[in-house]
Image (cartoon, rainbow, N blue to C red):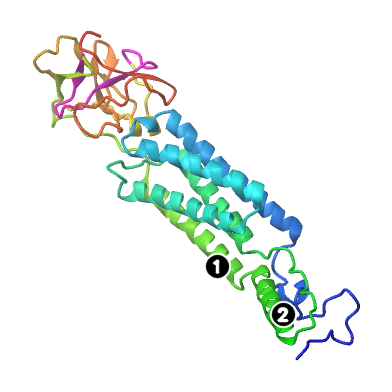
Amino acid sequence: MTFQPQPNARPGQASPGTPGSEAGNRPAAWPSRPWRLGLRVAGAGLLAATGAIHLDLYLTGYRSIPTIGWMFLLQVITAVGLAVAVLATGSRLLAAAGAGFALATLGGYLLSIWVGLFGFKEIRTTAGIVAGVIEVAAFAALAAFAAAPAAAAQPARQATGGSRTLTRFRRSRLLARLQAGIPGVGRAVASVSIAALVVLGIAVTQSGGPAPPPPASGARAVLKTATIGGMTVLTNAQGFTLYWFALDTPARSACYGTCAGYWPPVTVTGTPSAGPGVTGKLSTIRRSDGNTQVTYNGHPLYTYVGDTAPGQAFGNNLNLNGGPWHQMTVSS
């Protein structure tokens, strides 16, 4: 059995439905080559943008958070690596990997907002919301590019042997179908992207802004001391390191909103109490939100969300939320 060209086919032109016929296999809804290039560039660029945001967060404070810190660095390396690989090779497999990675990163952010991740609970921030939206867009672009058809399959060369010609015809037809894209995937990508945006919106709405912190220890803030890194530092009653902010004044705190979410102020409803070894002057100031904040030697006091256990001082010397932070030493 030998396959002959259809009588109406012009020389060098494949007939509809034959191997190499892009028109006979590609759905009309799939984007053309310029659009595929646009999806490729946009997806890679958006993925790199998420890496840049996570790099900024890593360098400005997240690197000090146990487990979460190195995960941010890993996200940066992976996002940029996949973006460069997709842009350089145009591999649909790598694009699919990038789409999955963007969706997984978004999932980690949502999980950290709702229930916490590795002991760290995220708060609502502009950077986090922007990164989430970009991750959804990166997923949509890369997934669409991965599922879109590649270049048209080349027509199979005719051979004299009947069985060889049939085999080549079948292989070429299968390749053409694969290159023509997967039916229904475009709608699935759009549906997943919309669902992800809806879930992101619900998550950031329910998370709310940073809530005012409770008093450090009941109605009275009891301050203690501990030796951390060879320095005697001030701690709260639970042993967590206390910090001061360079932008504060003795009468005013400069840390509100998102800043107060990462650096909860030490508040009190009564009078602060000094434990053994606390030799400095304790006082209070009235915050603009109505809470009373404890001060030590004229410095309003804070804890740091990155310290997850007593004896840690991950917030020391961080330049975050507009200025440097320092642990409060007893001699300060």
Which quarter of the picture shows residue 125?
Answer: top left
Residue position marked by numbered label 2 in the rendering = 169
Say whether residue 54 is visible. Answer: yes
Q: For the residue carrying disc 2, how many other residues have a C-alpha within 10 Å: few (<14), some (14-19), or many (20+)? A: many
* Label 1 sits on residue: 188
Q: Amino acid at mark 1?
A: Ala
Magenta span of residues: 231-251
In percent of width and height, residue 332 lies at: 25, 9
Q: Which residue is pictured at 52% across the width and 55% down the height?
A: 97
Q: Quadrant of the N terminus?
A: bottom right
Residue 142 image point, x, y percent = 59, 55
- Pointer 1 or 2: first along the chain: 2
Closer-to-camera residue (213/316):
316
Which residue appears farthest toward the left when viewing the image? 276
- Taking the view exactly as shown, the residue that stands out farthest to the front is 161
Q: Mark 2 is on which residue type?
A: Phe
Q: Please tell me whether residue 67 belongs to the stretch shown in magenta.
A: no
Give how far apart the Cα atoms at labels 1 and 2 are.
Answer: 31 Å
The quadrant in which residue 288 appears is: top left
The number of callouts visible is: 2
Residue occupying image coordinates x 75% and y 56%: 34
Residue 65 lies left or right of residue 273; in this view the side is right
Image coordinates for residue 170, horizontal then vertical, percent = 68, 80
Question: Which secondary structure lies at badge 1?
Answer: helix
Q: Main secondary structure of the magenta part?
A: loop
Residue 71 is situated, as x and y percent measured from the top left of the image, at 39, 41
